[in-house]
Image: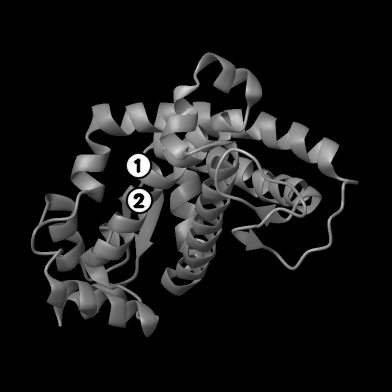
Amino acid sequence: MNATAASVSAATAPVEVDRHSRLVRVTHWINAISFLLLVPSGIAILFAHPEFYWGEVGYFGDPAALTLPLEPNMDHTAWGRGMHFLFAWVLVLNGIVYLLGGLFSGHFRRQMLPSLAQLRPSHVWHEIVEHARFVRPTGAAVLNYNVLQKVAYLVVIFVLLPVMFLTGLTMSPAVTAAFPELFTLFGGRQSARFIHFICASGLVLFFAIHIVQIFVVGFVNEMRSMIFGKFRIEPSQTKGEQA
């Protein structure tokens, strides 16, 4: 346990601690705004052709790998594509800043890399049960990510978002004309579109769970820490940690 966590555990009065760096807070909100604009614009594009195929080509009437129960609608494709393209690049550039900052500052190593003890099946199962029961962490435990959070953040940062970026590029004829290797990587433009949709669905699920967990832990406190960097730990939480 570090000095901050130790002081929190020993405290009998409310403790206010530094929770998130300025870099994390700024990039977090840029990511959040970008994502909230990418979702509706992506849905507008999806309505134009709510079917997915595997390979290079596919169109209405061809055997589909997945057909969504949506009525095709071309009315919103134009603004959807423009907004999606714009905020996709905002998300990518902001993500690069966050990634480099996290790597050079040690943020990922210190806060997101699970320990061997956390990866024990018994500990993972315990965390799953605690989450299913909406148990709020107490005391010094609130200052650290649990193993489920760590794994989820690592998958989002190092798997889902990079794959989203690369599959997005694969859907661009201009990019694939210069880098045809992307077709080999994903098995074709339509395959890339299908994978893009799957990753996007995973991100939406992550976002929904993230919002629920904010309310479980404490909405006001979490918002304060992500806006101002300060997180308040109440005496009742501290006593619960010591018990």
Q: Are marks 2 and 1 in contact (CB under 8 Å)?
A: yes
Q: Amino acid at mark 1?
A: Phe
Where residue 206 sits in the image (x, y, percent)? 48, 60
The picture quadrant where one finds residue 116 is: bottom left
Q: Could you classify mark 2 by the number of other residues whose Cα lies within 10 Å: few (under 14), some (14-19), or many (20 or more)? A: some
Whether 37 is drawn above or below 7: the answer is above
Mark 1 Cα shell of 10 Å, populated few (<14), some (14-19), many (≥20): few
Kind of residue at disc 2: Val
Q: Position of residue 162 (x, y in %)?
A: 43, 37
Marker disc for residue 158: 1
Residue 47 versus residue 155: which sits nearer the camera?
47
Name the mark on residue 155: 2
Viewer can see residue 90: no
Residue drawn at x 62%, y 40% is 34
Residue at 48% from the left image edge and 54% from the top image edge: 224
Quadrant where the C terminus sits is: bottom left
Image quarter where the N terminus lies is: bottom left
Residue 207 placed where, x, y %? 52, 58
Q: Quadrant of residue 172?
A: top right
Give x and y (percent) for residue 109.
19, 41
Q: How is the image coloured?
A: one colour
Taking the spot 66% from the left edge, 50% from the top edge, the residue there is 39
Image check: 142 left or right of 222? Answer: left
Q: Is 144 rendered above or below residue 106?
A: below
